[in-house]
Image (cartoon, helix red, strand yellow):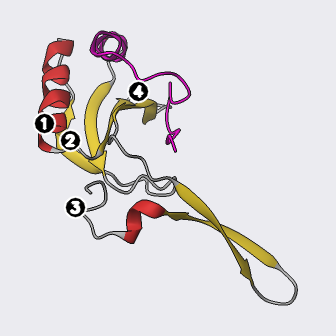
């Protein structure tokens, strides 16, 4: 199952050149770029691990592409995404976020039905990835 989070998630994976172009766009807009990774891509897991520090004053996209590739090398079986943060007064938020790397096997999610108070039925998502301990989720 392909995880669809962030911009471009319904498209085919971006090439390195397309990633560089998006990073270039973020830098032209003076957005701070950061790289994050996780092995638990649940939609409510908004706190991915940060790779290094946000790159506030960078003007060359090559520096960010270098960090993306270093993260890919260190975590080949994790999801890796790029965030572009706009610090402009009135915005002060992530303006762009997209996945740049995925594990080869994406186990996906199941919909869990729960009967709760009265005749109410509640639904929640269960990530198959979390059936294994952290660090072992995308290995055979």
Residue at 37 percent of width and 15 percent of height: 22
Comparing labels 4 and 2, the label whose residue is closer to the camera: 2
Q: Which residue is tagged 2?
A: 76
Q: What is the number of the mark on residue 135?
A: 3
Q: Which residue is tagged 4?
A: 88
Residue 12 belongs to the span the image colors magenta = yes
Q: CA distance from mark 3 to mark 2?
A: 11 Å
Is there CB contact under 8 Å for labels 4 and 1? no
In terms of secondary structure, where does tag 2 sit?
A: loop
* Label 1, residues with CA under 10 Å away: few <14, some 14-19, many ≥20: few
Does residue 61 lie above or below 90 as drawn? above
- Res. 133 image quadrant: bottom left
Q: State the image coordinates of residue 100 (x, y, percent, origin top left).
A: 33, 29
Residue at 32 percent of width and 54 percent of height: 39
Q: Residue furthest bottom?
A: 118
Q: Nearer the viewer, residue 111 or 93?
A: 111
In terms of secondary structure, where does tag 1 sit?
A: helix
Is there CB contact under 8 Å for labels 1 and 2? yes
Comparing labels 3 and 4, the label whose residue is closer to the camera: 3
In terms of secondary structure, where does tag 3 sit?
A: loop
Dot placed on the residue nearer the N-terminal end, 3 or 1:
1
Q: Which residues are magenta?
A: 1-27
Is there CB contact under 8 Å for labels 3 and 2? no
Dot placed on the residue nearer the N-terminal end, 3 or 4:
4
Comparing labels 4 and 1, the label whose residue is closer to the camera: 1
Residue at 27 percent of width and 15 percent of height: 16
């Amino acid at each position: 199952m392909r995880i669809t989070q962030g911009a471009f998630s319904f498209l085919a994976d971006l090439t390195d050149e397309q990633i560089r172009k998006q990073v270039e766009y973020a830098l032209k807009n003076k957005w701070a770029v950061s790289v994050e990774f996780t092995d638990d891509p649940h939609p409510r897991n908004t706190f991915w691990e940060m790779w290094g520090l946000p790159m506030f004053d960078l003007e060359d996209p090559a520096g960010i592409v270098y960090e993306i590739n270093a993260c890919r090398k260190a975590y080949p079986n994790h999801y890796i995404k790029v965030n572009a943060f706009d610090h402009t007064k009135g915005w002060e938020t992530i303006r762009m976020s997209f996945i740049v790397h995925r594990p080869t096997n994406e186990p996906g999610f199941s919909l869990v039905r729960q009967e709760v108070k009265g005749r109410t039925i509640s639904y929640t998502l269960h990530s198959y990835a979390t059936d294994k301990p952290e660090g072992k989720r995308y290995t055979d």
